[in-house]
Image (cartoon, helix red, strand yellow):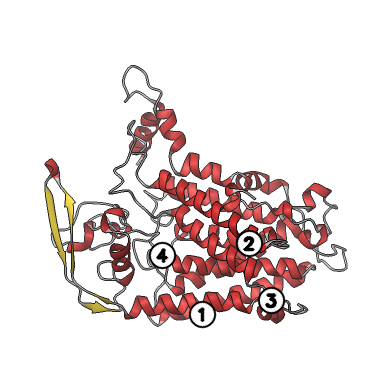
Amino acid sequence: MGGYELVRSDDAAVTTPDLEFGGSTSSKAEPLPPPRPPSPAARQRLVSLDVFRGITVLLMIIVDDVGGFLPALNHSPWDGVTVGDFVMPFFLFIVGVSLTLAYKRVPDKLEETKKAVLRALRLFCLGLVLQGGFFHGVRSLSFGVDITKIRLMGTLQRIAIAYLVAAICEIWLKGDDDVNYGLDVLKRYRNQLFVGLLLSVMYTVLLYDIYVPDWEYQITGPGSTQKSFFVKCGVRGDTGPGCNAVGMVDRAMLGIDHLYRRPVYARTKECSIDSPENGPLPPDAPSWCQAPFDPEGLLSSVMAIVTCLIGLQFGHVIIHFEKHNERIINWLIPSFSMLAVAFSMDFIGMHMNKPLYTLSYTLATAGASGLLFAAIYTLVDMYGFRKPTISMEWLGKHALMIYVLVACNILPMFVHGFYWKEPKNNLVTEVHWNQSMKR
């Protein structure tokens, strides 16, 4: 399993066909006619996981390309959850499930730990190149980045961190208890659950208890002039854009010059006349509206690890239960439970918030991941509906390549490099011009 499999983990490493594909599919056990027996090669993969990964890749592309003029698909400016806010948790959940299949048998724990560290480092470095500012955008033919201002965190960096911690937990923190019922899974992997609980409590305490002092920042204006802004805070437990503990910790540990410079809260009503889209600043805009803020920051990545650990537990159900109905039940119960707790927390004021990756957001997206995974598993692996999902399966098997080429604009920038006489005469510019005219 190489660095590529951090997004597409190779389930073929699991060589027990019945355990991977499920138990008996006789008509007595299932309400629908059983699918035809899969070929030996097909039985070595959990196809539903590839399909789930492919659906997530497609959703990511749609959010990036359509979300700009369809707010329901774009990321939420702050509190609340939209369709686009499920992409990152879906990927993290899938990584967790994949790890249980990849590490079903670990003959040499030290060697596997070393490999996991190297894979995480490769993915983190790839993220630095793709999202650190080295490439200057679709409309720019230049490249290069000032390392004093490189963005240190990003999507792949967050996945690398979560992958590494989850992999170490799966390698080292397994019990030897027998598993006969759903609760036995919790007992066998109680140490992993303790890690997830500890991280959740630690993050929640930091978010609501750290004192956030006043702070200031500078941005470069027209003519390379420096403009300074002062943000008045002096509070604890604030979860607004300007005075939250997540931003403070990232500014202190990473440096404000290494954070994302187009914060999502620039689309809030306080910061945009055209909210929930980007627009001119209102006359009375708060001073924090133009401040850098990283939605994949260091502190918020703690809860991303928790999402990955939850994915591990769903993967353990595949390992320890062979019958389809046992797997489905052991997925649906925790999924609905997490959703119920998440909505309860949101109701009492602990809002779902992707930029902060709050506990309620973690539970809501993990619960949704579990339900969607169970639904895909039922259709694809249980009843054998492969043809309608073959394109999603292909996307899932090549997820990282598609992410690099499409989501990170590598392919559009490559196409942009070929033009007719002048750089503005290229296919990418023509497509963007047509899209703007349609709007």
Please, what is the three-letter code of the amino acid marked with disc 4?
Answer: Lys
Whichever of labels 1 and 2 marks the residue nearer the N terminus, that label is: 2
Percent x, y of residue 340: 53, 78
Foreground mark, 3 or 4?
A: 3
Q: Residues within 10 Å of mark 1 (few under 14, many from 20)?
A: some
The quadrant in which the C terminus is found is top left
Q: CA distance from mark 3 to mark 4?
A: 33 Å
What mark, if any, has residue 232 been given in the picture? Answer: none
* 341 horizontally vs 273: left or right: right
What mark, if any, has residue 110 been given in the picture? Answer: 2
Whether the residues at callouts 3 and 1 have beta carbons within 8 Å, the answer is no
Label 3 sits on residue: 175
Callout count: 4
What mark, if any, has residue 341 been given in the picture? Answer: 1
Whether the residues at callouts 3 and 2 have beta carbons within 8 Å, the answer is no
* 197 horizontally vs 316: left or right: left
Foreground mark, 3 or 2?
A: 2
* 180 horizontally vs 169: left or right: right
Please, what is the three-letter code of the amino acid marked with disc 1?
Answer: Val
Q: Secondary structure at mark 1?
A: helix
Whichever of labels 3 and 1 marks the residue nearer the N terminus, that label is: 3
Q: Secondary structure at mark 2?
A: helix
Q: CA distance from mark 2 to mark 4?
A: 35 Å
Between 237 and 256, the one lying in front of the other is 256
Please, what is the three-letter code of the amino acid marked with disc 3?
Answer: Gly
* 260 horizontally vs 189: left or right: left
Percent x, y of residue 66: 42, 47
Q: Secondary structure at mark 4?
A: loop
Whichever of labels 3 and 2 marks the residue nearer the N terminus, that label is: 2
Please, what is the three-letter code of the amino acid marked with disc 2?
Answer: Leu
